Image (cartoon, rainbow, N blue to C red):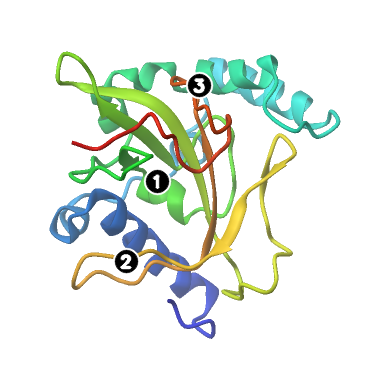
Amino acid sequence: MTNPHVPAARFLRHCTMAVTCLITGSATAAHAAPQPPPPARQAGTTTVHATMHATAHAIAQARPPAKLSAAQRKVLTDATRRFRDADEALAAGYLPTDQCVPGMGWHYAHPGLSADSTIDPVWPEVLLYVPGRDGRPRLVGVEYFKADADQDAKTDPDRPTLFGNPFDGPMAGHQTPPGAPPMPMHYDLHVWLYLTNPAGQLASENPQIICP
């Protein structure tokens, strides 16, 4: 676990690499890959995404739901549908995985978004894939991630929400590959957009996903 006394800026730098190393399952690949900035916030926002942001903001002002409404799901699917093509995810700066996590699948993480404390509904930090029938990655859901600011499991003043739904956590960082920075205590929220989850739309694990 990251030392709670590490300054915030340094902590976020560690967070970027730790999350990348953990989710790709390869410290070497993570260190070799470029660190792309959060696309929507540093590279400008397209007209389409501007409309999505406006819609997401309007929905967020409504009474917090117990789960995602049809309108909220549409905001997320409209924003991520293009990532059904894994090549589009790579082009957008998401780094591929080489390890399947039972109940979740393969994680494609964006280092810049993972280190950014802002939760943007139309730019999830992580994309979740499983092998498709043709052998190519099949997008099944997304994951939102935020490092816990004070690294204290007993406090949660910075707990993020997605359309009023609180994130899970704070939880201890998971094991990382040898030589990789430790993963910090964090919050996360899974959203199963493209594969029904009998455990719930926002459950952490999907029992339909079984790793080979």
Mark nearer the viewer, 1 or 3: 3
- 63 relative position to 157: left or right: right
Q: Mark 2, residues whose alpha carbon is within 10 Å: few (<14), some, or many (≥20)?
A: few
Report the residue marked by disc 2: 175
Would you place residue 93 above or below residue 69 in this image? below
Say what secondary structure mark 2 lies in.
loop
Would you place residue 107 above or below residue 137 in this image? below
Would you place residue 181 above or below residue 201 in this image? below
Report the residue marked by disc 3: 79
Say what secondary structure mark 1 lies in.
loop
- 19 relative position to 51: left or right: left
Say what secondary structure mark 3 lies in.
helix
Amino acid at the residue labelled 1: Pro
Residue at 38% x, 59% y is: 16
Amino acid at the residue labelled 3: Ala
Question: Residue 150, position in %: x, y?
Answer: 61, 74
Quick one: 129 or 158, which is closer to the camera?
Answer: 129
Quick one: 91 or 107, which is closer to the camera?
Answer: 107
Q: Earlier in the sequence, mark 1 or mark 3?
A: 1
Report the residue marked by disc 1: 37
Q: Which mark is residue 11?
A: none
Could you tell me how far apart the alpha carbons at marks 2 and 1 are, in whole angstroms? 25 Å
Could you tell me how far apart the alpha carbons at marks 3 and 2 are, in whole angstroms? 31 Å
Question: Residue 49, position in %: x, y?
Answer: 55, 21
Mark nearer the viewer, 2 or 1: 2
- 96 relative position to 127: left or right: left
